[in-house]
Image (tube, rainbow, N blue to C red):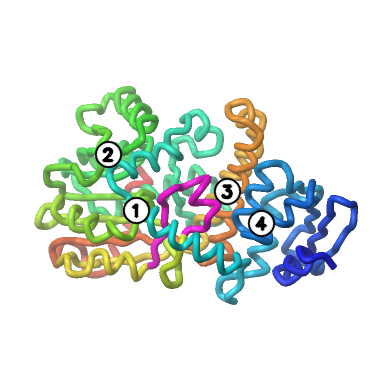
Amino acid sequence: MALIDRFLARAVRRGRLTVIHPDGARATLGAPDPDLRDVTIRFADRGVARAILADPGLGAGEMYMAGRLLIDEGDVWDLVRLFKASNAWERGGGLKAGPASRAVGAVKYRLDRYNSARRSRRNVAHHYDLSADFYRLFLDDDLQYSCAYFTDPANSLEQAQADKKAHIAAKLLLEPGMRVLDIGCGWGGLSLYLHARTGAEVLGVTLSTEQLAVARARAEAAGVADKVRFELIDYRAVKGRFDRVVSVGMFEHVGPPQYRAFFAKCRDLLTEDGVMLLHTIGRMGKPGVTDAWTAKHIFPGGYNPALSEIVRGYEGRRMFPTDVEVLRLHYAWTIRHWYERAVAARAAIVAMYDEPFYRMWTFYLSGAAAAFEFGGMCNYQLQLSRARTAVPVTRDYLPAREAGLIGI
């Protein structure tokens, strides 16, 4: 058995994988699993095996992007899911890079986490300055690019994203005329929702010129540009005081060295009885590192924090942690919708960019979904307040507030 076959055989604990080598030799690993599709992969040349052995995550992803790792049976979703299911986080599994690759990667990763204002702008542009028309191909109608909230796993993506906005708005305890700061406002959907449903005035800030243009156009089209404003500005440069601060899907780009500065700034921006809601991807275990493929191709400078790292960020800032919610499978269900829509839009994506880009994006979505279904990733929602009495002392207020928002 070839070295790559022995390596893969150790990782395939569930499901059946067939490997076809460049010379036509075949190796069948594992056994059929009713919850996983059989997958057959083919190596176009001998360099594919070498790349995977050198660094499994980076090598496999780049070989797939280049069209040198081919999938003859199943698709990339099935392939990634097979490996993640075989190496579930709670059982301590996972494909590991060699010691040298891990050492080099760890040093590079720590350097990349220092997200200065200039570096943050560059990192944001890498991912979020892609055409909004591209994101429209697979996101919901409101362009929500973060974990949805599934009150029922069978719900549509549109329903789950609407429920997510209602869930967040309920936790913010908004009243007409309140001033809200939306840090990392994306294409403006949440900011516009908060104003439409509650009458609050919102300032959304982003570092993406593409997102800014879309958000401003949406506010103008809705006739609320005087109540919902959008600015191209780093959160560190925002001035003023706000009754509420909300940040959804942005904290992943702050970087651990800046966590304490982030929370200090948020506290300073809040009024004395202000409330903050932070929605972020996180890891359920201890602090770690971003995998090399994602850091290189998808989110340079990005990092999903452990809960302990978030807590260290705000401890000592005299902010009351009034609620912490853990969303486990919600993002896996969300990304499944995105993946299916991206696959259906393959021709449009290839025409807009190219085939390697399409392969990169579907590999990213597949890996991300599997990380939430079988890996150690989750979503955290943290509610923080400056005043002891700013938030009800029980969570009983949430269902009624959500129902009222959904019913509007």
User: How far across and down, in percent of the image, does residue 204 sit?
Assistant: 27, 38
Main SS class of the magenta portion in the image: loop
Q: Which residues are magenta?
A: 290-306
Q: Of residues 77 and 66, which is closer to you in this image? A: 66
Residue 251's label in the rendered image is 1
Q: Are marks 2 and 1 in contact (CB under 8 Å)?
A: no
Q: Is residue 401 left or right of residue 380?
A: left
Q: CA distance from mark 4 to mark 1?
A: 26 Å
Identity of the amino acid at label 3? Leu
Q: Is residue 245 at all visible to an observer of this figure?
A: yes
Q: Which residue is mark 2?
A: 205
**Residue sticking out furthest to the bottom:** 91
User: Tag 1 or tag 2, which sits nearer the N-term?
Assistant: 2
**Residue sticking out furthest to the right:** 24
Residue drawn where x is 50% and y is 61% of the image? 104
Q: Of residues 240 and 254, which is closer to you in this image? A: 254
